[in-house]
Amino acid sequence: MDPPPRRLAALLLFLLLAAASPAARAWKKDEFRNCNQTPFCKRARTRAPHSLDAPLSLAAGSLSVGPDGSISAELSHPSRPRPLVLRLSALPPDALRVQIDEHYSVSTPPHRRFYVPDVLLPDIEARTLHLPEPKTAAGVSTVALSSDLEVVVKHDPFELTVRRARSGDSVLSFNSHGLFDFEPLQESKPEGETWEEQFRSHTDTRPRGPQSITLDVSFHGADFVYGLPEHGSTSLALRPTRGPGVEESEPYRLFNLDVFEYLHDSPFGLYGSIPFMIGHGARATSGFFWLNAAEMQIDVLAPGWDAAAAPANERIDTLWMAEAGVVDAFFFVGSEPKDVIKQYVSVTGTPSMPQQFAVAYHQCRWNYRDEADVDGVDAGFDEHDIPYDVLWLDIEHTDGKRYFTWDHSAFPNPEAMQRKIADKGRKMVTIVDPHIKRDSSFHLHQEATEKGYYVKDATGNDYDGWCWPGASSYPDMLNPEIREWWADKFSYENYKGSTPTLYIWNDMNEPSVFNGPEVTMPRDALHYGDVEHRELHNAYGYYFHMATADGLVKRGEGKDRPFVYQELSLLEVNGADVGGFFGNPEPDLLVRWYQVGAFYPFFRGHAHHDTKRREPWLFGERRTALIREAIHMRYSLLPYYYTLFREASVNGIPVMRPLWLEFPDEKETYNNGEAFMVGSSLLAQGIYEEGQKYVLVYLPGKESWYDLRNGSPYKGSASHKLQVLEESIPSFQRGSTIVPRKDRFRRSSTQMVNDPYTLVIALNSSKVAEGELYMDDGKSYDYQQGAFIHRRFVFADNKLTSFNMAPDNLGNKKFTTECVVERIIILGLSSGAKKAIIEPGNREVEIESGPVSLRSGSSSVVPTIRRPNVRITDDWTIKIA
Amino acid sequence: MRRLLLVAAVLLGAVAASKPPLDTLGIPPQDEAYYKGGVIKCRDGSGRFTRDKLNDDFCDCPDGTDEPGTSACPEGKFYCKNAGHTPITIFSSRVNDGICDCCDGSDEYDSNVTCKNTCWEAGKAAREKLKKKVATYKSGVVIRKQEVEKAKEAYAKDEVELIKLKGEEKILQGLVDKLKEQKKLIEKAEEEERLRKEKEEKRIKEEADKLAAAEKKATDASQPVDSKETNEHVKEDDSKVGIPVADQHELATEHDNHVPESETSVEQHGSESQDDGRIEAGIVHDTAAKESAPSTEEQDPSADNPEGLSREELGRLVASRWTGENVNEVNKDDKKGHEDEPEIPEPAEEALENELEVPEPAEENYGGYHSEIEDDRHKYDDEDFDHESEDEYVSDHDEHVHSYKSDDDQKHDQPSDVTTSGKASWMDKVQQTVQNVLQKFNFFKTPVDLSEASRVRKEYDDASSKLSKIQSKISTLTEKLKHDFGKEKEFYSFYDQCFETKEGKYTYKVCPYKKASQAEGHSSTNLGRWDKFEESYRVMQFTNGDKCWNGPDRSLKVRLRCGLSNELNDVDEPSRCEYVAVLSTPALCVEEKLKELQNKLDASLKQPGHDEL
């Protein structure tokens, strides 16, 4: 189905757009555990600071620098069966890794704790710095991490602080409230103790007993903390969940769950989990990432929660509780938020470069029912001159929810259907979910059963759950061998009816189990390597997705970038279902959703099967025109978006950004959940009410902003009360930027390849601006060997210059294009110049007054260089005469 | 043939060889004059451009005036001549995009594809198609004229009938009133006699007993009690084709008061209507629950308490939230598209309140398209309209059910004791009979003449039953004539017809002015009740059908198009529970459209491309 879509992808760092869905009424609160029903959470949450029975202390003599340059030490308490091993390592530039696990050689429990594999970059150990010998005095050891950063380790009780060496300002601290608790694994169940847990009709046998970990982390200098996707929230900053002024609240829960009609303002866990938090304030920015795939509950504590005599305003305390696993945590210290993100991706990796079509508009519905329906929808776009790139098929396209098959009565000729779509440069996507129908005549089930590839239940039999197909089992994606087996299922030979223009959508990978506890798999189910499901739950979808993506790479013989959409939240590629999954939006609000959705990194219309059809042309001519314009705007900005995806793939900075990522010094932006940035050049703010007349928009920064539609300038660092227009949501280009566009509209992005560019220059007060353009073939990996064009445009001294940004030593593949620049629009240019001179060639071109965007009735108000026709690949200058 | 291909090749050559001159590129012939001057205005008034900027691949007029032949303006249009076929105008976004849109290939004059000129073939095919369409229209127009004539006659006839019926109603009402008076007198006399007899009871007990017994027997005799079972059986069968025989029975059994037949029909509808009653209650509950928030859970007692469910039940329950299926009906995932159908038991139309207010008028055929006069007269001549004749009818009717075909179910002869024609005779007869009875009865005879009393009662019952029937017919006919049958009453015959088609396992039935349904086996879903015509009689709209779980009330739009007979086709459900279908009918074969098509055909045959060939 469409679960993913149904799911709002709320992203860390991203604005959450509240879905106008009939949410609250249907959320089955009772079917999900709250903290009080979750013993490890209840225990940890009700504990007072510094009240542990067995606080851990560092054995001074155990502190040492190992041959790999990391520091290790033992943490212990006499009551424990075995000490803990602490390992500190540093990753340049400013990241500290803290690992804590049990010292198994002292006394050996039947099972070891689980480390989440295949998430961290493989070269991470190689990049570890060699730390200097710690300096110890008065029970405190200090280690220099870099010239201005040091780690201070207090021995008893154990406490760890990262601080600025020069100023002594703390940035992040661990266990400063004495809440660090690490329940030791026990060798056997003590007499009279009960390990089983009950929730509703489900019993969790918990054969390995208690093993939870709790720790407190403080973000010094932070005004707000952000992150912990994925939650339904209308606030970008994480609201406190405990402490003075906070009403009864659950902690933020990270536990992937297939929630039907979730609450839109709740700390409750949704479809994906990323245990990453950023603290930001005027004085400091820092980040904390805990690599752990077990259920996690996190409290954001309001100042004064610890009954401290003088509540510190310049610090935010947080409490992290995990059911199992180890401590493998990263402390990131930035001078600004982008540094923290860069450090995070230096550990986990950057998002891969998407295909060009993935950045364009997608059309989905549960379900396009048959080939005629697909044909009709495809034709509808053409009839109304609305571009789209991808048409999606939800679960109904299969033969009885057996993935990799087709319902042959509805889709008798899937290959011909895909080819017909592909003839217009478009693609299709089919859904493949992890639940395999337990049907002995289904080859996939036969094979998985025979090979023992399914996740096992607590008794060791194939786990038998319930999902769309009815009784289902789940391939154990933790096992690399099974992932490889799965990947092979995507070959054209194995996936009958698939063609090279068919891509994949993974859904229901929480994993969703309709009759399981909390609609997911029992925690005592067993995976590869004797790992309990509780230990890897939040990463199951990750491995599933990994296997599918590998499958598409394999299918394309490594030449075609995979496109696999999944419902788990991603940092970079995200976007709510345009129109909302459930219910029927008011037609005017559907238009608004398209207008804001056109700015999402991932732009897809989607709907539940109970909704009315809502293809863009079904709401009258006027609304069709408005939706067409919104989609056109996205298509014209595709060169800019593609360039942003390139940036994300290099340094991890997301396409859609909170304002404070670009304006970290401006306090007004910290809690602004209304507007968002697309890259560093555009700002947009949605309109969420029907018939709204005015809207207040805060435009950050010193420089002016220019209305995207008509070029009108607005002052920066100011709130503007703007009249709400039918035609667009408030959207602006920032002064000092240059945005590349393609202003010709085609059926799909495929036909735009050779179309000429428009450059929109928005000058700042110094009459300076700059921007970038990245392009490649849009589909292969040749860019990794140098087959791309990366230009940098700088406007200064009345002259626009195009520079090559691509290093020439990346490889021997080349990408080239005949594309030219057909138009240069200059916002904020005061001179009345009529001509420009192009070099080389000393060619003269006209400057005339033109519209900012080409629509009937738009007025010609902006100086426009007409047909400079310089090649986009070349170096050139254009001087305003 | 060979010659034609050669010519086509020449045309193709011409396209590929040279880029057309910029000053005509993409411009329709009728607009060429607009572009003659040295300075040309943008059509939207936003500016002007010099002739050298025409088709220079840069958009100067945002509305596209200056770039008819390129892709430079987003709102531009490109004209392809398509010699040999029909000229078309395409979006500028299609120009040189690598996809051949014009059959002459003129839209790809500067791209990396070579388009074959397919205009001659395509034009030929299109002309053939157009010719066929014109031919259909030609025949259709003739049929339509006949139908319109028939409809007008029938309409007039119905109007006359209505007037007649009203007249008869008046007369019959008079008779009934008289008989009622008489009956009262008899009853009064009887009562007096009874009292008198009671006084004598002790004395002549035996005799009194005997008398009382006889009296009771006489009363019973006037009620066809023993026919009831049969009647209900009949009703059940009838309801499947929607024939309100029920009315007759009800009227035959109901005595004094004229109970609106629709109400009684629910109560007495045999087993099927009992189901309906239950379902109706369910619906009411549903509606009420819906208004007060979390309806679905309330309906399903297990929803709020999944504990105690089996694992499988729990799985189904959770799945059902996403799919909107009824839990008890789950595991129909494979039956794509219509999974939800069975979740709400069908509220048969009789159970719906609205329906009840409107007596099913379909069943009686007023149309006069076929003769039932003799049958009816025969039945009337029978005078004693009794259950025996009904039994005959039942079997008779059963045969009809078996041979029932989509659009002629209304043509079955309906047994009726009130016929449209031949009334004069039966009315005379009734009057005569009543007169006889009235005259014959001697009120002053004591004790009351029992056989005379029972005759009066019987006559009263018969007459009031007939009156009810006439009133029912009046209301039925009035209801019918209220409808909109089109400008020329061309849809008049639709009133008494239903159209059917099968799509997969479903049978769709559309009864204009009444309702539409989807049947699968024995279960039937109401897709909507007649709402109105839309789009100038090109669409029939049925709304307020059975409610979809978690969705809208079902509805159906039937698009009408010209065809030589009435045929229902292409039923589809583009949105959940919103159905569409196509009905071909001569009613849509209008003369103006024929002329238009003929002109189009003539024009296409005169095209330059065609002439060359």
Image (spheres, coloured by chain):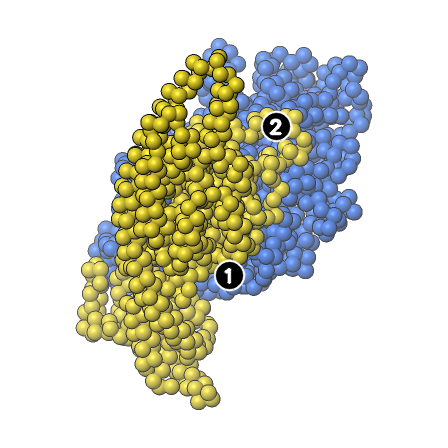
Q: Do marks 2 and 1 share a chain?
A: no
Subunit of mark 2?
B
**Residue A232 numbered mark, or none:** none
Q: Which residue is drawn at 26% across and 39% down?
A: A723
Q: Nearer the viewer, residue B258 or B581?
A: B258
Q: Nearer the viewer, residue B305 or A859?
A: B305
Q: Is residue A140 left or right of residue A642?
A: right
Residue type at numbered disc 2: Pro
- Judging by colour alone, the chain drawn in blue in this rendered image is A
Q: Is residue B502 left or right of residue A405?
A: left
The residue pinned by badge 2 equals B306
> In the image, residue B428 lies at what x, y percent?
32, 47
**In this structure image, what is the colour of chain B?**
yellow
Tell whether label 1 touches label 2 (CB within 8 Å). no
Residue type at numbered disc 1: Ile
Q: Find numbered disc 1 in the image and state the secondary structure of the residue it sits on.
A: helix
Q: In this view, does B34 lie above or below A586?
A: below
Q: Residue at x 77, y 44 (%)?
A: A452
**Residue A421 numbered mark, or none:** 1
> In the image, residue B385 lies at what x, y percent?
44, 44
Q: Residue at x 48, y 41 (%)?
A: B348
> In the image, residue A491 lies at what x, y percent?
66, 57
Q: Is residue A336 above or below residue A314?
A: below
Quadrant into which the N terminus of chain A falls: top right
Q: How many residues crowd around disc 2 within 10 Å: few (fewer than 14), some, or many (20 or more)?
A: some
> Most extreme residue toward the top, as rendered?
A309
> In the image, residue B588 lies at what x, y percent?
35, 62
Can residue A204 be spotted in the picture? yes
